[in-house]
Image (spheres, rainbow, N blue to C red):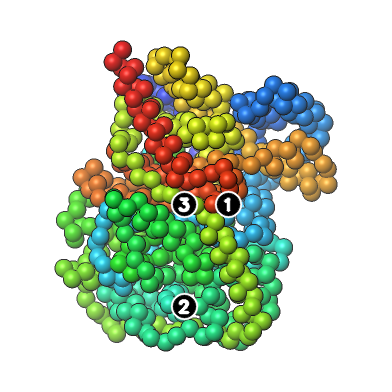
């Protein structure tokens, strides 16, 4: 049965077929669909049930990748540069490329996934620059929602829900995410969600996943606490957890010298942190305390400041995003798989390390936690349970975050005073403060790391833009993919902002294959460039612009589908580059390709991965999603979320030190591009 399913899952023709009203599936795809349904009809899959049935990521033919690459860079180059790149590509393809492809083919035969191990090692773990801002990403609360203003109560419900999610993962009681309710996505990234830490090394870091942990680490006012979450083998109730958080908040002890800024070690350069770990944290109380942090299920930060949403003051959202992205540069443990941040007024968010997983288990867990409260508050939930998401939504961290949100608001809830509901069954264990012995040399290393982190975070220009004029409802009426529509708006906005096209990155996923992570979609295409130029040409008619936009969106969808089906460009070229370095062979073509900066890096955050919450009836439950720092020094990082039928959120980051970027200016360009696209369709329909 496993091998039969693996053979069936190799078929990807259904991915390329049009969806929607009035469109029918081909005969081949219908027969394939019936065969898969017959094979899985009577099974109740557990989280990892389909892992052995997922096919390996296929290796594209070198010729196909080269053609796709050259097509993708055509709108970025003039005729002379494009001809030069064609010659480089042809020389590579007929020369060393054949040898590198043969080596990669051998790896694809014996490796579970020919990309993932190298991607994890060389893109994430070997990086020596700070992971704060550069790698870690963040997520935010349901910004219109205020289930409680009591910090300890919100922290307790979130913690309880997170442990429930861990229990579901450990027992494999989460069902695997199914595309079109038929094809499973790879679930391996769930394994390292909890009890996981990135451990620094001089040359390369490593990801360490520890055994089951019954405690979390809490950071408050410059101090770290070990907080047990189990008593006599049973998970404490939210009410009991609230008592523990209240004890931490009531603790008036002051940090020891150097302790308050200790987290800056994880925010600065990796090599100094690795050397400090070996010198100062290998034995004694420092080793014990560090081990307790790294073995904790996760880190929870009790903030001393408040953040809230004010529609008349957009800077409040910007402040909230910056708090989640980097904090003060020392008040997070950036090496942990994720930090939950609870503001003084009860608002919550998270900061997640990127190497262990991609961006969406967190949003599923988060949605689960937040919406758990709302049943008690009178909000409506969808009567059925399970997962729903469009086939294009790929992230993994989002799954976790979505779960937490639902559990927090829909299930646990709060009483009329804002405290956690439920009874006390025991006197919960008292949290214990972690001890440190930090000598002057160690404190100097901490201070140096903080200076690096402070300079980095002070250079971040972050803008959270909430677009309420329309959402995916209008896009679907235009019979266009919402993701493709937004990507075209970003292309138009960037062209107007920079006066030229640039290499654009959009994250896709390859989780239709075993151990799949991500692939790059290149939204800047020949078709998108033609549409943007037509929009800027006053002589172009509305009908011409609409036709060009449909063509550009269609090409974008095809690129997205290719990426999901293992026919992407960038991971293939990346692996060829790795092999060339192993063989000590120099390739001018690969050197140039891998050095090209992504000046517009984008990603879509999934929403509604559980159907525990009806966003149509509960519009206040929409999440603002999350974001990440800029990838290029002179570029933008843009994360967006399609939050319901009428709302979009954009998280726009850049560097203040860059003279050519401005996040607020780019947000205005996005707003104008979306308005122009709406007016374009309305004008075309009138004619």
Q: Is residue 162 visible?
A: yes
Q: Give the label on residue 429, or none.
A: none
Quadrant holding the C terminus: top left
Judge the density around disc 3: few (<14), some (14-19), many (≥20) Cα neighbours within 10 Å: many
Under circle 2, the secondary element is: loop
Q: In the image, is 317 to the left or to the right of 446?
A: left
Q: Is residue 290 above or below residue 551?
A: below
Q: Position of residue 629 (x, y in %)?
A: 52, 52
Q: Residue at x 19, y 50 (%)?
A: 380
Q: Residue at x 44, y 74 (%)?
A: 219
Residue under label 3, please give it: 462
Report the mark closest to the observer, 3 or 2.
3
Q: Residue at x 50, y 45 (%)?
A: 662
C-alpha gap between disc 3 and disc 2: 26 Å
Residue under label 2, please give it: 222
Q: Position of residue 336 (x, y in %)?
A: 52, 66
C-alpha gap between disc 3 and disc 1: 13 Å
Q: Residue 377 falls in which quadrant of the image?
A: bottom left
Q: In the image, is 585 to the left or to the right of 470?
A: right
Q: Is residue 606 visible?
A: no
Q: Residue 230 falls in which quadrant of the image?
A: bottom left
Q: Give the label on residue 657, or none.
A: 1
């Amino acid at each position: 049965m496993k091998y039969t399913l693996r053979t069936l899952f190799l078929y990807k023709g259904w991915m390329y077929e049009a969806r929607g009203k009035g469109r029918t599936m081909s005969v081949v795809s219908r027969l394939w669909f019936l065969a898969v349904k017959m094979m899985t009809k009577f099974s109740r899959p557990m989280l990892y049930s389909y892992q052995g049935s997922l096919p390996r990521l296929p290796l594209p033919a070198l010729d196909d990748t080269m053609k796709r690459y050259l097509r993708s860079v055509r709108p970025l180059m003039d005729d002379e540069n494009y001809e030069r790149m064609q010659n480089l590509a042809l020389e590579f393809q007929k020369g060393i490329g054949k040898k590198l492809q043969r080596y990669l083919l051998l790896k694809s035969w014996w490796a579970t996934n020919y990309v993932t191990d190298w991607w994890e090692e060389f893109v994430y773990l070997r990086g020596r620059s700070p992971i704060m801002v550069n790698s870690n990403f963040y997520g935010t609360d349901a910004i219109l929602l205020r289930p409680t203003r009591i910090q300890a109560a919100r922290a307790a419900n979130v913690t309880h829900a997170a442990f429930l999610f861990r229990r579901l993962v450990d027992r494999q009681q989460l069902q695997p995410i199914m595309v079109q309710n038929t094809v499973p996505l790879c679930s391996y990234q769930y394994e390292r969600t909890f009890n996981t830490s990135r451990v620094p090394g001089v040359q390369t870091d490593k990801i360490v996943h520890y055994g089951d942990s019954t405690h979390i680490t809490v950071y408050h006012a410059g101090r770290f606490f070990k907080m047990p979450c189990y008593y006599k083998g049973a998970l404490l109730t939210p009410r009991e957890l609230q008592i523990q958080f209240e004890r931490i908040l009531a603790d008036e002890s002051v940090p020891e010298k150097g302790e308050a800024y200790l987290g800056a070690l994880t925010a600065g350069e990796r090599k100094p942190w690795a050397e400090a770990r070996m010198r100062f944290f290998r034995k004694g109380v420092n080793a014990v305390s560090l081990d307790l942090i790294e073995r904790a299920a996760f880190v929870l930060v009790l903030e001393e400041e408040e953040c809230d949403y004010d529609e008349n003051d957009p800077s409040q959202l910007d402040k909230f995003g910056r708090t989640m992205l980097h904090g003060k540069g020392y008040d997070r443990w950036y090496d942990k798989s994720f930090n939950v941040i609870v503001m003084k007024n009860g608002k919550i968010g998270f900061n997640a390390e990127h190497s262990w997983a991609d961006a969406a288990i967190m949003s599923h867990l988060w949605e689960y936690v937040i919406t758990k409260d709302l049943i008690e508050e009178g909000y409506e939930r969808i009567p059925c349970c399970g997962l729903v998401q469009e086939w294009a939504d790929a992230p993994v961290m989002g799954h976790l975050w979505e779960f937490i949100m639902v559990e927090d608001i829909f299930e646990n809830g709060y009483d009329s005073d804002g405290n956690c509901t439920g009874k006390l069954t025991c006197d919960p264990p008292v949290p214990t403060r972690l001890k440190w012995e930090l000598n002057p040399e160690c404190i100097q290393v901490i201070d140096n790391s903080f200076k690096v982190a402070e300079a980095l975070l002070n250079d971040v220009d972050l803008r959270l833009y909430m677009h309420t004029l329309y959402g995916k409802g209008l896009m679907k009426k235009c019979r266009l993919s919402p993701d493709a529509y937004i990507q075209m708006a970003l292309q138009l906005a960037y062209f107007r902002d920079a006066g030229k096209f640039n290499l654009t990155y959009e994250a896709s996923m390859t989780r239709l294959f075993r151990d799949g992570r991500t692939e790059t979609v290149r939204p800047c295409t020949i078709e998108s460039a033609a549409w943007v130029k037509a929009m800027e040409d006053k002589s172009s008619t509305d009908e011409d612009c609409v036709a060009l936009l449909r063509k550009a969106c269609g090409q974008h969808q095809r690129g997205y589908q290719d990426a999901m089906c293992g026919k992407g460009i960038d991971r293939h070229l990346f692996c060829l580059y790795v092999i060339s370095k192993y063989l000590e062979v120099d390739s001018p073509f690969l050197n140039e390709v891998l050095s090209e900066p992504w000046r517009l890096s984008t990603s879509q955050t999934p929403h509604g991965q559980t159907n525990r919450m009806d966003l149509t009836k509960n519009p206040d439950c929409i999440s603002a999603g999350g974001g990440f720092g800029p990838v290029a020094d002179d570029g933008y990082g843009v994360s967006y979320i399609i939050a319901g039928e009428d709302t979009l959120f954009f998280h726009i980051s850049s560097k203040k030190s860059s003279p050519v970027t401005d996040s607020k200016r780019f947000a205005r360009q996005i707003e104008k591009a979306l308005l122009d696209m709406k007016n374009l369709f309305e004008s075309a329909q009138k004619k």
